[in-house]
Image: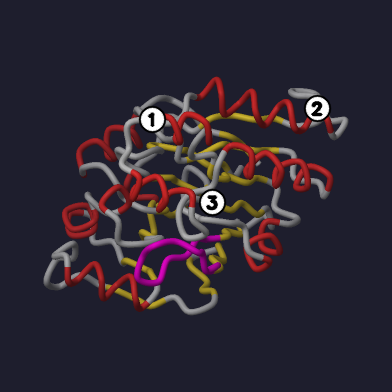
Amino acid sequence: MARIVPLFSGSKGNCYYIGTAAEGVLIDAGRNCKQIELAMEANGLSMKSVGAVFVTHEHIDHCSALKVLAKKHSLPIYASEGTLNALAERDRLAPNAKTLVIRNEIALGGMRIQRVDTPHDAAESCCYRVTTPDGKTAMIATDIGHVTEQIRSALTDCQLVVLESNHDIDMLRTGPYTYVLKKRILSDIGHLSNDACATELSQLVRNGTLRLILGHLSEMNNTPQIALRTSVAELGRAGMKYKNDYTLDVAPSAPTVKSVIF
């Protein structure tokens, strides 16, 4: 039975497990190695079930454990060529790390992992759509300034979607961040707002995606309650009832026992 386990999500680190108890992959490795190992253990998962780490981009909250984790557990690292080069430049890869460029999609064990390019202020960022051995699909789409047609197409027909709901626009605009940082976050290569996320979710549910998770919430410019309320309200305006027509969770920033079956 396939599931997604949001081990960590947010500005302090991001790491997700997708697969079954026997076989799966990690999407990003943004905490430290021990924290990821403990979070896996808390969710009844073994690092032995991890076939590879797929990295979305080189920002520290997505790769801080990569060097140690991949070396300790002999894990191959998949990413775009631009991301792998950026990781190497930042000394985020062990000298003998097994790195592989993913250009379109690859088969790994019984799974198929598809790369989907994302608009973000990174070298060559992407997200991943995963198809499990039983034909179920899940996709994690965070760190995106806006939803492109390629992303929207890849999201369509997924059984489960993690979509970025990074910030409340009013909180961001009136908050303590510098003007330059606010402009970056609000740009087309920044982060997706609660409102933008909610709009996309309503379309996803119309198309049959019924398992939804809000990801990469800002600790400074958002709260789980505000993000959840924004999406539930938008879905309600579209005639969809929370916990009846769909499920909606918030990916935790701290380790917890949390998984969603799809």
* Residue 57 picture location, percent across and down: 36, 62
Distance between mark 1 and mark 3 Cα atoms = 28 Å
User: Which residue lies at the image location 27% right of the left edge and 39% below the top edge?
Assistant: 37
Q: In which quarter of the image is residue 173?
A: top left
Residue underneath mark 1: 175
Identified by mark 1, the residue type is Gly
Segment colored magenta: 115-128
Q: Does the magenta stretch include residue 255?
A: no
Q: Distance between the residues labelled 2 and 3?
A: 23 Å
Closer to us: 209 or 196: 196
Q: Quadrant of the C terminus?
A: top right
Q: Is residue 103 left or right of residue 97?
A: right
Q: What residue type is labelled 2?
A: Gly
Q: Earlier in the sequence, mark 1 or mark 3?
A: 3
Q: Residue at 61% across / 59% down in the picture? A: 131
Q: In this view, does 69 lie above or below 55?
A: above
Quarter location, residue 80: bottom left
